[in-house]
Amino acid sequence: MSLAPLNPSGILQTAFSFWSSKVLLTAVEFGVFTKLGGRQMTGAELGAEVGLHPRAIADFFDALVAMGFFGREGDGPGSRYFNTPEGLLFLDEGSPRYVGGILVMLNARLFKFWNDLPTALRTGLPQNEVKHGQKGIFEELYSDSAKLEQFLGAMTGISRLNFEALAETFDFSRYQTLCDVGGATGLLCIEAAKRHAHLKCESFDLPQVEPVARKHIASAGLSERVTAVSGDFFKDPLPKADVITMGMILHDWNLEKKMHLIRSAYDALPEGGALVAIEALIDDGRRENVQGLLMSLNMLIEFGDAFDYTGADFRGWCSEVGFTRFEVIPLGGPSSAAVAYK
């Protein structure tokens, strides 16, 4: 039996993938999808709006076509580019489901920091602003309200689908109250309250975040059932609630701080209450969830000792604290909700 010949295409595709990544990230930074909106434009017209050199126009826009991020009607200089349905929904800043904020952050910060991955792997030290004598990401964000709101907006875009999926799939009917720890703009509480009219929710975060959360909650028309409360989850007890959620929170910290947060949640929950951690949860065999594993490497680059984890890791930590029952709920894509019941 003859075997198919081996070829290096998979190796080369991954090796060169930073090219396509940079094209997409640059397109978002330039606002190409937003400027195009629902229109059709020639390359010359769109290039003029974006400020491109004539040499770059065809290659840049046609690369976006070939990668599936743009559509194009016709061929040659007179052809007209248009947004795909996905581009219009997720990459046009005017869309309520815009996810481009996190792409702007990737381009501005992480693209260059990941160049120092070899150093991170050998030293275990952060490779972000701290390496260059600047403030850490959280210290910088919380000292500048404009940057903080931009960051929270970026996280809202990337978190929305997960929070919607949790609100749809987790059985909230048994519970009356929810507290989202590290609640940012209050999005998780908003999505849960929209779908479960009996639920009262609190979004818990630092004092600098509270005004941003209040604004988003009021905009959603949910101020009567969703409130924003402030505190420091490493210094203050967590608010009492039947369900405590942490969306992309635990992975930001080392094991000691992870355990502090899990213990704080246990103390705040009643008998039968639930802790829900939403992450790009690594599969227990550590063979399948590429995004979860890469996210954990990103935590190395950002914080050094922070890391992502498996459902089995979560179960072990929560068992140590006193939780007695566990499950993992897939939320779509690489993300899952790890649930521990008291």
Image: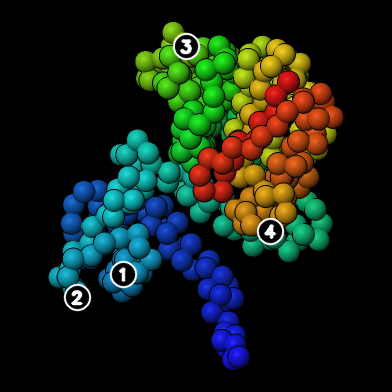
Secondary-structure class at tag 3: loop
Left or right of 158: which side holds 120?
right
Residue 14, x across and y down, in percent: 56, 70
Q: Residues within 10 Å of mark 4 (few under 14, many from 20)?
A: few
Q: Write down the residue under mark 1.
A: 62
What amino acid is found at the position of numbered circle 4 in the picture?
Arg
Lower position in the chain sequence, tag 4 or tag 3: 3
Lower position in the chain sequence, tag 1 or tag 2: 1
Q: Write down the residue under mark 4.
A: 287
Question: Pointers 2 and 4 in contact (CB under 8 A)?
Answer: no
The answer to whether residue 257 shows anywhere in this view is no
Q: Write down the residue under mark 2.
A: 76
Left or right of 16: which side holds 66?
left
Nearer to me, 46 or 96? 96
Q: Write down the residue under mark 3.
A: 198
- Does 286 sit above or below residue 195? below
What amino acid is found at the position of numbered circle 3 in the picture?
His
Secondary-structure class at tag 2: loop
Q: Residues within 10 Å of mark 3 (few under 14, many from 20)?
A: some
- Does 304 sit above or below residue 340? below
Give the foreground label among 3 and 2: 3
